[in-house]
Amino acid sequence: MITTATMTKRAGLLWLAIGLFAGLALAATFGGGAASADAQVTGLEEVRTNGVEQNFTTGTSREKTEVWIYGSGFTPGTEVYTLISDSNGVWTDITIPAGKRKDGGGTVYPLVANDDGAWATEWRIGRFSRRGVGGEGMLSLRVMDTSFNTLATTPVALCNNVDRPASVKGVAAVAEIPAAIGVPAIPAVAEVVEVAGIIPSHCEN
């Protein structure tokens, strides 16, 4: 005669077996996926531009500056995205070319590492300079894979070096005089220039 206790015990063992089987299946599925993703990372990925400081005219409808971006050390065949943060802290994909070259974006899409693990594209700033979108600042340009994992970064300084008023440049020049003649800096002048945001510290003017 099968008792209630025996039936309960058998049911418990059955559910335990089902649980173990499901756990093994999940581990095999997701464990394999992680290994596959790691296989796309060499650990040698690098990215650089043709210059850290790039001209950026704040508020213009279409900035003409073009920034060359180069990558190396990537797994051959890996597709990557290039992204940069706008003035609102939102990441913007600058890989895809705009409908018109003057509007900005990259020059190569899809952007895929060649047989030597290298790639190159040219970002035209274009409409990223519109008011309320991009802005002057020291930024990190990120290279991500198609799962948006960051593979490499490089600094980019966007500086208004063309349309900055001459009077403003003159004030900044005064702040630089002490260092040029080998005397202590003038804190008051330097503070006015930096705090007022006349010329960001990452710009060379």
Image (cartoon, helix red, strand yellow):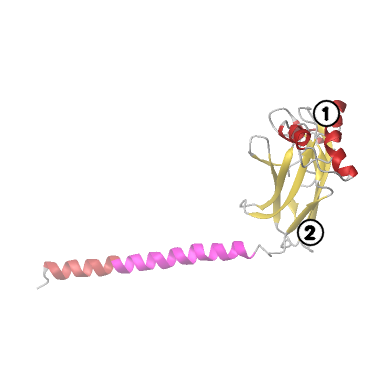
Q: CA distance from mark 2 to mark 1?
A: 42 Å
Q: Which residues are magenta?
A: 16-39
Q: Quadrant of the C terminus?
A: top right
Does residue 13 belong to the magenta stretch?
no
Position in image of residue 138 (x %, y %): 73, 42
SS at mark 2?
loop
> Which is more foreground, mark 2 or mark 1?
1
Residue pointed to by mark 2: 118
Residue lying at the far bottom of the rendered structure: 1
Could you say which is closer to the camera, residue 111 or residue 199? 199
Please state if 19 lies on the left or on the right of 29 as rendered: left
What number of labels is visible? 2
Identify the mark at residue 76; answer none if there is no mark. none
Q: Nearer the viewer, residue 18 or 128?
A: 128
Q: Quadrant of the N terminus?
A: bottom left
Mark 1, residue position: 168
Check residue 28 for magenta coloring.
yes
x and y, in percent, of residue 80 in the image: 70, 52
Name the spot of residue 99 as percent of width and height, x first.
77, 34
Local packing at callout 1 (Cα closer than 10 Å; few below 14, some 14-19, many 20+) is: few
Type of residue at label 1? Answer: Val
Magenta span: predominant SS is helix
Picture residue at 20% right of the left edge, 69% below the top: 9
Q: Against 50, is 100 above or below?
A: above
